[in-house]
Amino acid sequence: MIGTCLQLRSSSISNPHYWFIVLGPYKGHYFCANATDAKEKSDRSCVLLAGCHPQITKESVIHYRLSKLFPAAKLEAEVRAETNFRVYSSCSPEVVKQILDGALVSDLLPNDILKWLQEATGSGG
């Protein structure tokens, strides 16, 4: 599951963003990060260049403020069934590492997720 690219299925969102499963399961959760178009004032802790994944067609950034810890069993079931998400090919291990490294330095990552990541990776803090 690590590296899997997802897009929320929703009729109310005209252009839903892509999510990447970055780490887990750990303590019953997966860490998932949201990619969005790069803008002038974007957090640049993780910049994804066009072509680093087939769904990334222009410079994008990870919007760490919107990162989530998804319950593992529920996410695994939804990915298998593709009920709430469209499932795309996985990104490379290098892109997963880039997203994870950015999470550990971003000032925008919620503190509870940072603590979870530090425990999961043994990076302390």
Image (tube, rainbow, N blue to C red):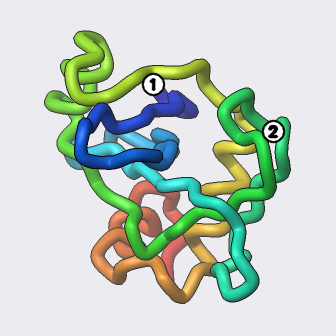
Q: Quadrant of residue 48?
A: bottom right
Q: Mark 1 points at which residue?
A: 1
Q: Position of residue 123 (x, y in %)?
A: 55, 69
Asked if one can make out residue 101 in the rendered structure from this viewpoint, the answer is no
Is 103 above or below relative to 80? below
Q: Distance between the residues labelled 2 and 1?
A: 18 Å
From the viewer's perspective, tell me whether residue 96 is left or right of residue 76: right
Q: Name the residue under label 2.
A: 52
Is 119 above or below relative to 41? above
> Disc 1 residue type?
Met
Q: Quadrant of residue 3?
A: top right
Q: Which residue is nearer to you in this view: 9 or 20?
A: 9
Q: Position of residue 73 (x, y in %)?
A: 17, 28
Q: Which quadrant is home to the N terminus?
A: top left
Q: Quadrant of residue 109?
A: bottom left
Instruction: Categorize mark 2 by other alpha carbons within 10 Å: few (<14), some (14-19), many (20+).
Output: some
Mark found first going from the N terminus, 2 or 1: 1
From the viewer's perspective, tell me whether residue 108 is left or right of residue 86: right
> Disc 2 residue type?
Cys
Residue at image location 58% in from the left, 72% down from the top = 104
Residue at image location 79% in from the left, 57% down from the top = 59
Q: Where is residue 80 in the image (x, y as percent from the top left)?
A: 29, 12
